[in-house]
């Protein structure tokens, strides 16, 4: 059993295929192509499309639901934590997005830093600058389902349907154990590790201990809504209710 043990990567599930680096580069290429086409047509005005953001407790299956949701919403693009991490941690991709961000949304980075960290914060670390630039670039290009990285705190709130997924520790341990093909004791240790990483991320980058339920349009508890298809259908209805009336 132990030789099958793999480190759990938040934002993955059993059917998900690897290749986040190439997916990140592809996403940026598609964004650049659409920007060029809009520029040629003289329609290159800044705009944030109608997006969906998934915030979740690690191991609840949000990415699986995002993929099911995408199939119901005209193949809406799914951008997970791994893709955003690739951009935020790559100076090449990060600078490419941030330069366009500053040009198209002047002053927004400073305003966002003040909103998140207070007036004492005048600068953002490169990671958050790149992450913010990537999120705005991707949302500027086309409607997107963002999974993870607290994107609901970055994009204009009126332009997103913000969904929070939660589940009991027991639910999450069993799911991670199934994904990694390990014992539940081993899965519990991994869950503790990634939960600490998530808390550290919120504290360091958003000055928050955790996500408040009041930040979201809806909160879905997977203990009581275990069917991912049913969860996806509920989000579809909420999205249409908010943006298509």
Image (spheres, rainbow, N blue to C red):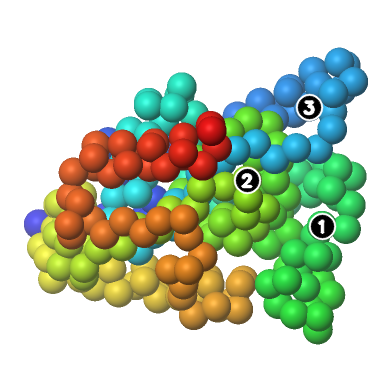
Q: According to the image, label 3 marks what residue? A: 35
Residue 147 x %, y %:
46, 49
Crowding near the residue tagged with mark 2, few <14, some 14–19, many ≥20 C-alpha atoms within 10 Å: some
Instruction: Give the total of numbered labels.
Output: 3
Residue 4 can be seen in this image: no
**Which mark, by number, is residue 211?**
none
Residue 115 x %, y %:
73, 71
Between residues 200 and 2, which one lies in front from this camera angle? 200
Q: Quadrant of the C terminus?
A: top right
> In the image, 210: left or right of 126?
left
Q: Which residue lies furthest to the bottom in this view?
A: 120
3D distance between C-alphas at marks 2 and 1: 15 Å
3D distance between C-alphas at marks 3 and 2: 20 Å
Q: In which quarter of the image is the N terminus?
A: bottom left
Q: Are marks 3 and 2 in contact (CB under 8 Å)?
A: no
3D distance between C-alphas at marks 1 and 3: 19 Å
| Identity of the residue drawn at 68% across and 62% down | 128
| Identity of the residue drawn at 43% across and 53% down | 163
Numbered disc 2: secondary structure: helix
**Which mark, by number, is residue 108?**
1
Residue 120 lies, with reference to residue 227, above or below; the image says: below
Q: Residue 184 appears in which quarter of the rendering?
A: bottom left
Numbered disc 3: secondary structure: helix
Residue 154 x %, y %:
65, 58
**Which mark, by number, is residue 159?**
2
Specify which label sits upstream in the sequence, 2 or 1.
1
> In the image, 68: left or right of 198?
left
Q: Residue 93 appears in which quarter of the rendering?
A: top right
């Amino acid at each position: 059993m132990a030789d099958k043990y793999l480190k759990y990567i938040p934002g993955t599930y059993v059917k998900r295929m690897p290749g986040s680096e190439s997916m990140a580069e592809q996403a940026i290429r598609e964004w650049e192509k659409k920007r060029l086409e809009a520029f040629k047509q003289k329609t290159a005005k800044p705009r944030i499309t109608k997006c969906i953001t998934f915030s979740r407790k690690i191991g609840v299956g949000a990415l699986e639901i995002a993929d099911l949701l995408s199939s119901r919403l005209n193949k809406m693009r799914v951008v997970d934590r791994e893709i955003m991490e690739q951009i935020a941690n790559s100076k090449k991709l990060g600078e490419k997005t941030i330069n366009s961000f500053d040009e198209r949304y002047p002053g927004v980075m400073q305003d966002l830093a003040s909103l998140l960290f207070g007036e004492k914060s005048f600068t953002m670390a490169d990671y958050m600058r790149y992450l913010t630039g990537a999120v705005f670039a991707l949302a500027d290009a086309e409607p997107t389902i963002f999974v993870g990285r607290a994107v609901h705190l970055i994009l204009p709130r009126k332009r997103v349907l913000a969904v929070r997924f939660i589940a009991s520790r027991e639910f999450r341990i069993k799911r991670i154990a199934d994904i990694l093909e390990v014992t539940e004791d081993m899965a519990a240790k991994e869950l503790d590790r990634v939960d600490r990483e998530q808390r550290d991320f919120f504290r360091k980058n958003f000055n928050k201990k955790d996500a408040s339920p009041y930040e979201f349009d809806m909160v879905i508890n997977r203990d009581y809504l275990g069917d991912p298809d049913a969860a996806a259908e509920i989000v579809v209805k909420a999205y249409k209710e908010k943006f298509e009336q």
